[in-house]
Amino acid sequence: MASSPPYAGRRALITGASAGLGAEFARQLARAGAELVLVARRPEALEAIAAPLRASGSVVHCLTADLSLRDEVSALVERVEALGPVDLLVNNAGAGGPALLGPAPLSEQLRYLELMMLSVTQLCHAFAPAMAARGWGRILNVASVAGRIGRAGDGHYGPAKAYVIALSEALHLDLCHRGVHVTALCPGFTHTDFHAEGELAAMKAKLPKFLWYDAATVVGEGLSALERNRAVYLSGRLYRWLDPFLQSVWVRPWLRVPARPG
Ligand SMILES: NC(=O)c1ccc[n+]([C@@H]2O[C@H](COP(=O)([O-])OP(=O)(O)OC[C@H]3O[C@@H](n4cnc5c(N)ncnc54)[C@H](OP(=O)(O)O)[C@@H]3O)[C@@H](O)[C@H]2O)c1
């Protein structure tokens, strides 16, 4: 007798599902039997991801929200709660952003941190307690290898991801014996839309190809780590091998994010 897919009957909320890793999380979780709630700012892009999944028999809801605006995150929580319980939460939405010592006004910098840190916190706050009360849940927070290393020129992206890792580790310790798995997934360079434009595209063009992984590998490794209840997981053998070197105080002064205009 064929066994049912591992997440059959489970509802998964995925942020940043209109592109890249989030779209791949949607595809893999749909294959695993989950009902999906996809979130991003662009409704047409969300629908383009949802359409083939619905055609394959998945139930998919698309909700638009700008997660850098706290009121929109609160409204999103209400809309999701109206659909029913969330069993899996994938906090994936993210972007490159302004630098702390760059010319962007403070208001823009703080809004960026709303997206990268506080929306993750707010969604964990909204859904983790109910998962623990039901005795089953999965939370995967997409961080980054950048969150593992302090680098000159890296305020705010790396520090925001370091917060996501620390938050995930603490939540993992709180919830690991209550049926709720919490994992911070730390990808290295991954082929998505993240480096599609501007200075990030220029940076990508200069980097060697062996540093890059595809989204399907990163997401597959992340979901596997989540099932194994790993607190922090670096995707990609190369990055797992590099991590101890990147932690060294002797190596860090040599790492620097290229100067950015904003
Ligand atoms: N690609 C890499 O090399 C890499 C490496 C390490 C970590 N990561 C992390 O992986 C995650 C996914 O990134 P990706 O590589 O898949 O990039 P991507 O292809 O650019 O996708 C980013 C997703 O986030 C959504 N998003 C961006 N700003 C948002 C906002 N204010 N409100 C709601 N949704 C927003 C985008 O949707 P809309 O534009 O429709 O809103 C899109 O769906 C991010 O957290 C990123 O930091 C990426």
Image (cartoon, rainbow, N blue to C red):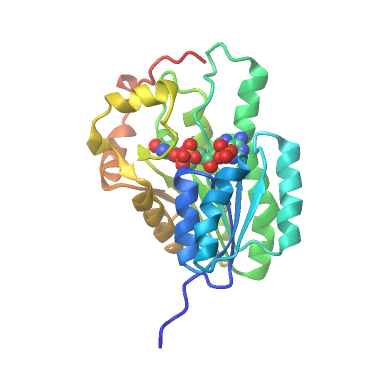
Image quarter of residue 98: top right
Number of callouts: 0
Q: Against 88, is 151 above or below?
A: above
Quarter of the rendering occupied by the N terminus: bottom left
Question: Farthest residue toward the bottom?
Answer: 1
List x then y, in percent, for residue 100: 54, 18
* Residue 146 falls left or right of residue 95: left
Could one spot residue 79 in this view of the protein? yes
Question: Farthest residue toward the top?
Answer: 103
Could one spot residue 250 in this view of the protein? no
Image quarter of residue 251: top left
Instruction: Compare residues 44 and 242 and report the one nearer the observer.
Output: 44
List x then y, in percent, for residue 205: 30, 26
List x then y, in percent, for residue 215: 38, 47
Instruction: Compare residues 220 and 191 and report the one nearer the observer.
Output: 191
List x then y, in percent, for residue 160: 53, 33
* Residue 216 falls left or right of residue 79: left
The residue that appears at 64% across and 21% down in the rendered structure is: 108
Q: Against 242, is 204 above or below?
A: above
The residue that appears at 40% across and 25% down in the rendered structure is: 200
The residue that appears at 28% across and 24% down in the rendered structure is: 206
